[in-house]
Image (cartoon, rainbow, N blue to C red):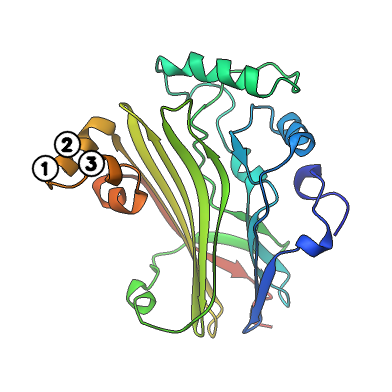
Amino acid sequence: MNGQGLAGVPRPPAADAGQSIDHSGFRITTRKLPILKAKPIEQMTAKLGIAPPEMIFGDNYVSIKRPESGWEVNFNTFDALDLVDKTGESMLQVAHSKEWQSTREKKHEGITEVVKPFDWSYTTAYKGTLRGQHARFEPTDQPIPLEMLKRPDPILFFDELTLYEDEMADNGITLLSCKIRVMEMRMLLLCRFFMRLDGVMIRIRDTRVYVEFYTNQVIREYVAREENYEAVRRKLAMKGQDVPAQLRDPNSLVELLPIVDRSLERLVDQRMFL
């Protein structure tokens, strides 16, 4: 696997190819490797055109493939960061942004690119990367069958990994991570973006990819939520919960944040049923 990887960033050797499971005509692969070193970070930065997060797991990914049909849904770090606003129009205008920029200039002294205005929270609406000439996602009214996923079915494969993380100059956290579980009849992938900027805002953007193996049905759901930080803190306090601990746990926060965007799609491929 030596050579050029995503967007020209060098790939790890074949020994680091990750772990896979082949099931019902699908191949599910995950790869978890350490934080990128200086040279790959410089290459990724040059291609992205923005300063990188503190922790970039640029070799990590999750892949769902249908080899016979030739399509793949892939979740990777570069494509997620490439959707971050690079104009500065979506940048959170708070006092800490100048402090953050200063830390980036010091932290990445080997990178000669000027730190340009952009969304320093690294907010992304990433829904995964679809590859395959004959595959596309189109709108659907069919929801992900949550009741099916609540069944205590044996788990054939499970993994979770981080794509990138940043502590926003000690003013919160921004984190993009993936979690996947494969059962006999179905599988679910969750890619979650979680951002908490203390005193300002909390965001969660969830992309779920659901596969029903024996019908080849693939559904993708995207849900974006956000709320004012103080409003969330008050809601937690009214419940008598440990507020600092809950503010660090997106699972505890997700239902407290109003939905601001939502989409539901199904994958269509004319060769899927061959």
Q: Amino acid at mark 1?
A: Met
Looking at the rendered image, the quarter that the C terminus falls into is bottom right
Residue under pointer 2: 234
Residue at image x 18%, y 47%? 241
Could you say where residue 33 lies in the image, as x and y percent from the top left?
68, 54
Residue under pointer 1: 238
Residue 243 tag number:
3
Determine if residue 206 is in view.
yes
Q: Amino acid at mark 2?
A: Arg
Q: Secondary structure at mark 2?
A: helix
Q: Mark 2 against mark 3, which lies toward the viewer? A: 3
Mark 2 and mark 3 in contact? Answer it, CB < 8 Å.
no
Among numbered discs 1 and 3, the one appearing first in the sequence: 1
- In this view, the residue in front, 250 or 189, is 250
Residue at image x 49%, y 15%? 99
Q: CA distance from mark 2 to mark 1?
A: 6 Å
Q: Quadrant of residue 29?
A: bottom right
Among numbered discs 2 and 3, the one appearing first in the sequence: 2
| Disc 1 residue crowd, few under 14, some 14–19, many 20+, Cα 10 Å | few
Q: CA distance from mark 2 to mark 3?
A: 9 Å
Q: Quadrant of residue 137?
A: bottom right
Q: Amino acid at mark 3?
A: Val
Could you say where residue 210 lies in the image, as x and y percent from the top left?
48, 69
Residue at image x 74%, y 23%? 111
Can you say whether 44 is above or below 76 in the image? above
Can you say whether 228 is above or below 261 in the image? above
Q: Secondary structure at mark 3?
A: helix
Mark 2 and mark 1 in contact? Answer it, CB < 8 Å.
yes
Q: Mark 1 against mark 3, which lies toward the viewer? A: 3
Looking at the rendered image, the quarter that the N terminus falls into is bottom right
